[in-house]
Image: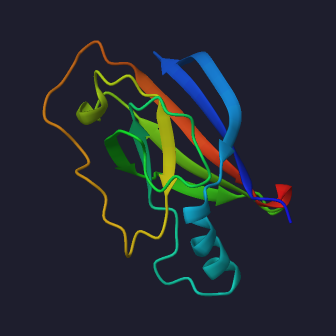
Amino acid sequence: MRRPIGTVRICLVQRDRIVWTYGGRNLFVNAGLPALAALLGGDTTGEFAAAVGFGTGSNAPAVTDTALTAPAYYKALDGHSEDGNGGLTLNWSLTTADTGAQGLTIQELAIFANHASTGLPGHDRAGSDARAQDYCANSLWRGNEY
């Protein structure tokens, strides 16, 4: 059986125009497998994607990862949608209102699940930066690509 995989799509939006896009595969780590198995088995208590995390670490991802290498900022997901064909889109955004992320060199991105038993660090730092850019993105977990 093949490991579940995800696809990350990111778009940078300035003044309501997309000025940059990125797309690539996202690693589904071992720590996420119990939550997936619980959901497939019908145990939905606390087993859901809850937050996106942004880190500044530069280590290569590994299936044994349990956290971001250098966590810096976490934010609740904006929502999700299902395509009816086994695909799930987890929506998130990072905007100028997310002052805790301003000034970071984001090198890591992760979706965190099993929120009922896993606490996340603080979600924001005080401060503002008028030069900050607006970001929009989503993580697409393709259930039909196992």
From this viewpoint, is residue 16 visible?
no
- Looking at the figure, which quarter contains the C terminus? bottom right
Residue drawn where x is 38% and y is 22% of the image: 105
Q: Which of these two is toward me, 69 or 127?
A: 69
Q: Residue 81 at what x, y percent from top left? A: 64, 57
Residue 52 shown left or right of residue 96 in the figure? right
Quarter residue 11 falls in: top right
Q: Which of these two is toward me, 61 or 141?
A: 61
Residue drawn where x is 36% and y is 48% of the image: 75
Residue 70 shown left or right of residue 66 in the figure? left
- Looking at the figure, which quarter contains the N terminus? bottom right
Q: Residue 31 at what x, y percent from top left? A: 55, 64
Residue 58 shown left or right of residue 25 in the figure? left
Q: Residue 50 at what x, y percent from top left? A: 45, 61
Task: Answer above or below: position of 16 versus 73.
Answer: above
From this viewpoint, is residue 139 visible?
yes
| Coloration of the structure image | rainbow
Quarter residue 87 falls in: bottom right
Q: Residue 32 at what x, y percent from top left? A: 58, 64
Task: Answer above or below: position of 11 versus 112.
Answer: above
Q: Give the residue at the far bottom of this rendering.
A: 42
Q: How many marks?
A: 0
